[in-house]
Amino acid sequence: MAHVSIPSIEEIKEALFEVLNNKIFDREEFLTLYDKAQTAKFLGVSKGTVDNLRVKGLLKVTYVGSKPMFSFSHIKEYINGNHHSSH
């Protein structure tokens, strides 16, 4: 029977950060805003979880009209744990 190791949270964060970094090829893409569905996919969570993180102030948001959008830098801040609840 093969030994299966489960990655640590830090290993998951590093892998996700690498995926996000590889998604960003140039400065223009770095400035791209991602919608809730894209952000949820990046983070491996549901759109509802993204909403909860936004409402709690744990994931910074930029509104385009009334639509919440998320920047790479704000997603990266959340992944790295540099978030503070505004409540």
Image: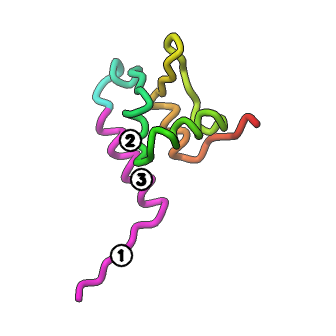
Q: Is residue 79 magenta?
A: no
Per the image, the residue denoted by label 2 is 42
Dot 2, how many residues are within 10 Å of its Cα: few (below 14), some (14-19), or many (20+)? Answer: some
Which residue lies most toward the top here?
Answer: 65
Give coordinates of residue 62: x percent, y percent: 54, 20
Q: Are marks 1 and 2 in contact (CB under 8 Å)?
A: no
Q: Is residue 71 left or right of residue 5?
A: right
Q: Give the CA distance from mark 3 to mark 1.
A: 16 Å
Give coordinates of residue 46: x percent, y percent: 44, 44
Q: Residue at x 42, y 26 (%)?
A: 35
Per the image, the residue denoted by label 1 is 5
Q: Residue at x 48, y 23 (%)?
A: 69
Q: Quadrant of the N terminus?
A: bottom left
- In the image, is residue 78 above or below residue 61? below
Q: Circle 1 — which element?
A: loop
Per the image, the residue denoted by label 3 is 14
Q: Nearest to the eye among marks 1 and 2: give it.
A: 2
Q: Circle 2 — which element?
A: helix
Give coordinates of residue 68: x percent, y percent: 51, 23
Labelled disc at residue 78:
none
Q: Is residue 18 magenta?
A: yes
Look at label 2 and name its amino acid.
Phe
Q: Quadrant of residue 31?
A: top left
For the record, the magenta segment spans 1-23
Look at label 3 and name its amino acid.
Glu
Which residue lies most toward the left here?
Answer: 1
Q: Quadrant of residue 24?
A: top left
